[in-house]
Image (cartoon, rainbow, N blue to C red):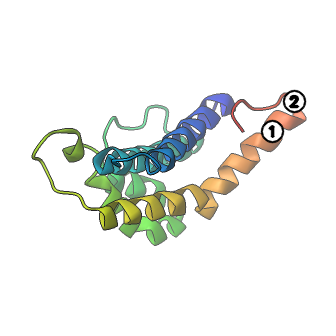
Amino acid sequence: MDSAVILEWFNYGDSDFISANWLTKNHPVHIELVCYLCQQSAEKYLKGYLIFKGVEDPPKIHNLDTLCEMCEKYDEKFAEIKKPCNILTIYGVQPRYPDEMEIFEQDMKKALAYAEQMKAFEPLQAVRNELIEKHKKRGCEPHGI
């Protein structure tokens, strides 16, 4: 397990989440892109967790339900985030193409809240904190944290 690689997954998730929030300040708000970035942030957090648990090459899928089920095999607490995963999954592909789905402002707000919940989810934060401590003990400051 390369802790730097895993932290990069978390950092990329953070970047997507920060970008999603930043886009809400633009007018007009590109709701579809915000929802897509929320899904992407959650996907990266889950894949980082799986790599931490020894899954060398997490599946190249956007289905957060499947990724969450994989994570749940290592920690049953992941059952707590099934709903956010289910809702965010729909934003992984369809919003990227015209006329695929209609997304409204309340959908975007829910996506942002679910992405925030994923970012703060205790098992994911525990992994991040453990890896940060390992880096600090080696005398290096992890990039992007």
Where residue 32 sits: x, y (%)?
Answer: 28, 48
Taking depth in this image into account, of 99 and 133 the one nearest to the observer is: 99
Taking depth in this image into account, of 122 and 52 the one nearest to the observer is: 122
Residue at the spot x=25%, y=54% of the render? 90
Amino acid at dot 1 = Lys
> Would you say residue 94 is visible in this rendering?
yes
Neighbor class of circle 1 (other Cα within 10 Å; few <14, some 14-19, many 20+) is: some
> Would you say residue 51 is visible in this rendering?
no
**Position of 136 compared to 24: left or right?**
right
Return the residue at label 2.
138
Mark linked to residue 126: none
**Position of 102 compared to 10: left or right?**
left
Residue at the spot x=47%, y=49% of the render? 25
Amino acid at dot 2 = Arg
**Position of 128 compared to 88: left or right?**
right
Q: Is residue 120 above or below residue 144?
A: below
Q: CA distance from mark 1 to mark 2?
A: 6 Å
Taking depth in this image into account, of 129 and 28 the one nearest to the observer is: 28
Q: Quadrant of residue 37?
A: top left
Residue at the spot x=60%, y=37% of the render? 11
Where residue 131 sits: x, y (%)?
Answer: 73, 41
Contact, CB < 8 Å: mark 1 with mark 2?
Answer: yes
Where residue 10 sits: x, y (%)?
Answer: 58, 41
Q: Quadrant of residue 40?
A: top left
Where residue 47 sits: x, y (%)?
Answer: 47, 42
Return the residue at label 1.
134
**Secondary structure of residue under mark 2:** loop
**Secondary structure of residue under mark 1:** helix
Quadrant including the C terminus: top right
